[in-house]
Amino acid sequence: MAYTYTSRAIAELAHQLALSPRHLRSAQIAGIEKMLTLIEPDQVYPYEWVVFQITGRKCPRTADRPPIVGETLIADVTTLAEEFTRRGAPTRSSLAGEYRTHDELSAELDVSAKTVRRWRTKGLLGVRVVGDDGVTRLVFSRSSIDLFKRRHADLVARGASFTLLTDEERANIVALARVELAERREKMHVVARAVSAKTGRAVETIRYTLRQFDAANPTDTLFARGDGPVVSPSHLAIWKLHQAGQPAAAIAKAQDTDVKSVLAVIREMEARSLKDERIDYMDNALFHAPNADELIVDAPRPAAEELGRSAMRAPQGLPPYLKALYAIPLLSREQEADLFRRYNYLRFAAARAVAAMDVHTVGRVVLDNVRDRLAQAEAIKNEIIQANLRLVVSIAKRHVGPADNLFELISDGNMSLIAAAERFDFSLGNKFSTYASWAIMKNFARSVPEARYHRKRYVTGQDEMLDATSKATEESTSGSDLAVIRAALSAGMEQLNDREQTIVREHFGLSNGGGTTKTLEELGQQFGVTKERIRQIEKRAMDKLREALSPGLLQSFVHA
């Protein structure tokens, strides 16, 4: 069992006492009990005084052991007594005076065993002793019990009063809590204080009663995990009507409540929806500056660069919709950095506000501010995407084949562009178009050959038609498809080391324009290793390619 101390010096003392001879335990325990009667919680005590009180020995004063506050000392010494007696428990007969076991003390004070355990952290001294039956038990001396009762009379009285609660009183506490929750959506500790003021019961008693009620009534709980009030069916109904566009006054009339309560529920449900929403961003040290809003959001935007007519001219053969994309100005490096800085900061600020948000007390201003920042970020992302849509068109035109749909490729590429914008780290200083081009081409390298492979693999029709078109299919594969496959593999090969690249290229005939292949045995002789070793290296290389490329693409390559 691990013991926790506030004072490191007392923790070291506990370790030393645990190593001391067992016959000294009774004197050490007596010293602790006497010392506890002398300690005042608001005073400070030198470490040397503590050692002398427990052991009767003087130790030199050192600067690395600061004085200990009485309240801390009481808690730490109580822990110390239990720890060092656990490691070397004295016999019950070696201790003088009257002692009570854990259960006996619970019965005497008319409190639960759990309450006694809680009081031990507040200074109720317990020690481990070996009884006549050879069993080690935790016991409490009469002097330590009386001392605790004097110092914590109110606490002991409140603990005893809890066991006197009748079923009627418990039901009344639950009913009062329901009334409080109907009037204001607060956490359990706030509701418990209000009910405590009305009933005269301790806050701890109220809180424990409410938790017991929730545990016994899982379908009618008052509070959810985290001690916040549960979302009731009526709250869900109000939220559903609000999302449908109903005004608060109409909702209040339909739900037989007042407008203020409806607005409070709407705020809570909106805050909960924000808590459930994942707000990702690329963090940056500038975002944590105290004047980040002034440095980022309020800063002027960089001026757009003047572009020549050739940079704005659309390629021949494009539909009017796609030609219109080339009328949108390109972004300079400074503009890109500024937009990505704003985009990520706005999402960072929104995420930070949501994390600090209390769904039960959040105000409309905070919610509107978060929504406004997210909307601004979304508008900036759309601005970035609009300026780079021509990039998708350009790459899609290079990958489209006779049987492919250009608009489907562009739609697929647009999704890659959006994902790239959300993951781009502007702080690295790279151009977004370079990062986005790689992301789009990587996606096309997987999706385009895989789609073509799927069409050829699962095409349906008469057997005669399949036989008639088999030759054309092979020719198509050896044409544009194979070119795309090899282009994708060229990028994938960069993931391999030099030896892996050489083995793959020469075994599959990719070197010197293709055609000539080498067996594993020939490659083994070339590298001075066994054929089996070459096989292992090739397998590892192919596994790396599988991670970078889709299964259909890799299979097309192997059988090309």
Image (cartoon, rainbow, N blue to C red):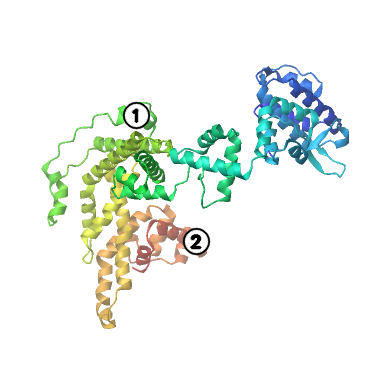
Q: Does the rendering let one see residue 244?
A: yes
Identify the element where label 2 is drawn.
helix
Q: Does the rendering let one see residue 3?
A: no
Quarter assignment of residue 260: top left
Identify the element where label 1 is drawn.
helix
Residue topped by disc 1: 292
Residue topped by disc 2: 536
Image mark count:
2
Q: Nearer the viewer, residue 213 or 31?
A: 213
Where 478 sits versus 188, above or below? below
Residue 347 lies, in percent from the top left, at 34, 39
Circle 2 crowding by C-alpha within 10 Å: few under 14, some 14–19, many from 20: few
Q: CA distance from mark 2 to mark 1?
A: 54 Å
The kind of residue tagged 1 is Ala
Residue visible at 34% across and 62% down in the picture: 510
Residue visible at 43% across and 60% down in the picture: 542
Left or right: 413 in relation to 146:
left
Where 236 sits versus 41, above or below? below
The kind of residue tagged 2 is Gln
